[in-house]
Amino acid sequence: MINLKVNGKDYTVDADPSTPILWVLRDALELTGTKFGCGMAQCGACTVHLNGDAIRSCITPVARAAGQEIKTIESLSEDAIGKRLQKAWIEEDVPQCGYCQSGQLMAAAVLLKEKPNPTDNDIDLGMSGNICRCGTYQRVRKAIHRAAAMK
Amino acid sequence: MKSTTVKRLFSLNKIIYVVLVLGFVTAVAAPFKSSNKIIQPISANKKIIDPIVDKEKAQADKIREKESAEAFKEAYKVLMHPRCMNCHPSGDAPLQGDDSHIHAQNVTRGKDGKGVYAMKCSNCHQKENTPGLNMPPGDPDWHLPPANMKMVFQGKTPAQLAAQFKDPKQTGKTLQQMLKHVEEDHLVINSGWNPGAGRTTPPLSHAEFAAKFREWIEKGAAIPK
């Protein structure tokens, strides 16, 4: 049994310690906002926050999160940065198919937390690990600038 | 009267004897006295022997220097192997693969060498290798050298790399500390010799590599020509 704190709630999960966090979230906790993309930390679709860092949940063993704090897309709008990002995403109409977007948002939240007024270069450096097959990159960029300007 | 003369003569003889004895003692003692000086001539002789010793010493030094440089050249093969060099790039992005292409996602070093924003090394690199072909290799402290001490290997000749290693301004470490990194740092050992499925390892074992690096330093850290 592994004790987890996910989106502020405590859970005890019966899972092998090597199980990727993604499958615990989706299958055991039914938090399906986090997506499976490549399964090898290459695309960013599965990005969640572990103690505030944008980890790739598809390859991170749940053992690493024992007693730690996980935040997923389901709780993003609970803090100020998340709220602004959500608003900016809607205003810029960022998603197309949407599959990568929860990962994009979770990555953007870490970027804004660590760099409240990011330059285009900061956005490139912070967001290049999140791939979008629809090519929404320009709108992602605009939405991040918009969210940063909302304060 | 006669007897007094004889007596006087006798005493004169006595004096002569005394003088003779003194002379003899002095003569015998003289070499001993100068034997003190003999010690000095030995050290003085050293000046005569020295050139030979110096020549031998110079020859030994030359051999040591050559061996040191040779040891570095062996270690260099490991240092420039992709498993080592990929995290000592000339740019700010780590490299990947045996062709040392820029790391997917254009990951960058950041100030502390541990990445930036949503692109930190440990977001993907776990404490241990993730099982499976070409999955992210792991270590508890996966990182590049920090921005203020980049420790670039990429593109350097053996002479340039050795000179860099000897310059604490470029390494932030003494040679002994560098040796410790090479011999004991689990990141060196894990990323180099336990790199995960689908990755080649350097041409020497870690023990052989560490021994060559140690030999290079202990024999004077010569800069290879």
Image (cartoon, rainbow, N blue to C red):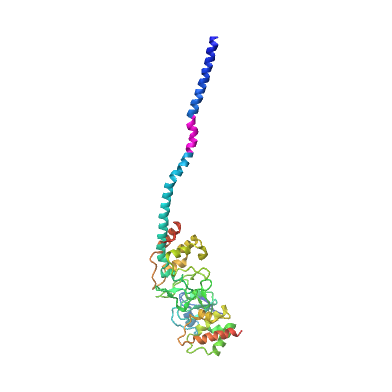
Using the rendered image of the protein, determine whether residue B158 is visible from the camera's viewpoint.
yes
Residue at x-position 51% and y-position 84%: A102
Residue A18 x/y as whole percent:
45, 75
Q: Quadrant of the C terminus of chain B?
A: bottom left
Residue B22 vs residue A79, the one in the foreground: B22
Identify which residue, B14 or B166, lies in the foreground: B14
Looking at the figure, which quarter contains the N terminus of chain B?
top right
Is-magenta flag for residue B38?
yes
Q: Residue visible at 49% across and 27% down?
A: B25
Residue drawn 49% across the image and 31% down it = B30
Question: Could you say where residue B63 lies in the image, as x and y percent from the top left?
Answer: 40, 55
Percent position (x, y) of residue A9?
A: 56, 80
Side of B3 relative to B74 (left or right): right
* Position above or below: B182 against A11: above
Q: Main secondary structure of the magenta part?
A: helix
Is residue A49 depicted above or below B200 in this figure? Answer: below
- In front of the other: B62 or B93: B62
Q: Position of residue B12 (x, y in %)?
A: 53, 17
Residue at the top extreme? B1
Question: What segment carries the magenta color?
Answer: B29-39
Marker count (numbered):
0
Please name whichever residue, A147 or A25, is drawn nearer the observer in this view of the structure.
A147
In the image as oriented, which residue stretches furthest toward the right?
Answer: A151
Asked whether residue B107 is drawn in magenta, I would say no
Left or right of residue A150, residue B126 in this image: left
Quarter of the image for residue A80 reads bottom right
Residue A77 visible in the snapshot: no
Figure check: A66 above or below B216: below
